[in-house]
Amino acid sequence: MGWVVLLGSLSALVGAWQLGLALSRPGLLGRLRRLVMGLTFGLVATLSLGLVVALRSFEAFAASHPVALVECRWVGEKTFDLQWIALHEGTPQEPLTIRLKGDQWSVSGGIVKWHPWLTALGMPSYQKVTRISGRYAAVQEEIAHLPTAVELNGGFDRVWEWLYRLDPYLPFVEAAYGSAAFLSVNPAVVHQVDVAPSGYLIRHTRRPPPRT
């Protein structure tokens, strides 16, 4: 993207210079030539600016940000301990161990997607993980057992609730919604929970280095 910004800046400078020469040049033909060159460079600068905005919008829309690392281990029949390691600017925080029941785990929370013009400026979506829960792959087991869930980050998110209710009246909010992602318990794998404008994502990752 840097070369696009450089091209646009140079085009704007050259265009302004050519327009200045067009105003000061004595001959009509020379003025027209400078005017055309100035407008051409101005057009290139405008197109470069539009391309930069489009690229920033795409990057902001497609980008995902790490939220936490998750490890699981079985401790009994359909019972497991989940270790939640929150990530603050990519740095692992103090681990939290949660005991859950089921053969899958789920992470959920609220997400606010800003209007595209804010996204184009690089403003990331608002998100807050509020719950970790155990779940069963089979619906019959899910019905037969009481759910196990733990609140995270204070649980209920009043900011998200406020933006959700006022969404129709706020021009800078495109959508406010809840998102959840789940996976089967796998003690052999470390998972990374990411958030993107489309919702929460879970992917395999490396084991974090030990805290010092």
Image (tube, helix red, strand yellow):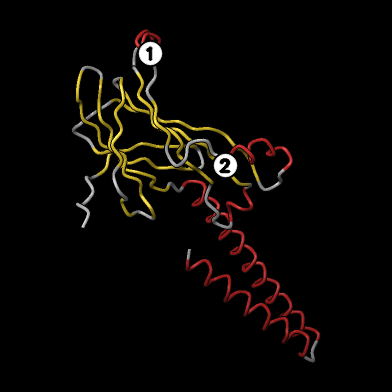
Tell me the number on the disc at residue 112. Answer: 2
- Could you tell me which secondary element the residue under label 2 belongs to? strand
Which three-letter amino acid code belongs to the residue tagged 2?
Val
Discs 2/1, front: 1
Which three-letter amino acid code belongs to the residue tagged 1?
Glu
At a point 56% along the width and 60% down the height, the residue shown is 52
Residue nearest the viewer, comparing 40 with 1: 1
Q: How far apart are marks 2 and 1 (CA)?
A: 29 Å
Whether residue 29 sits left or right of residue 87 in the image: it is right
- Rendered location of residue 35, percent (x, y): 74, 78
- Rendered location of residue 156, percent (x, y): 52, 35
Residue nearest the viewer, comparing 99 with 201: 99
| View extreme (front): residue | 154
Classed neighbour count for the residue bearing mark 2: other residues with Cα under 10 Å, few (<14), some (14–19), many (≥20):
many
Residue nearest the viewer, comparing 49 with 186: 186
At a point 29% along the width and 20% down the height, the residue shown is 103
Q: Is residue 146 above or below residue 15?
A: above
Residue tagged by mark 1?
142
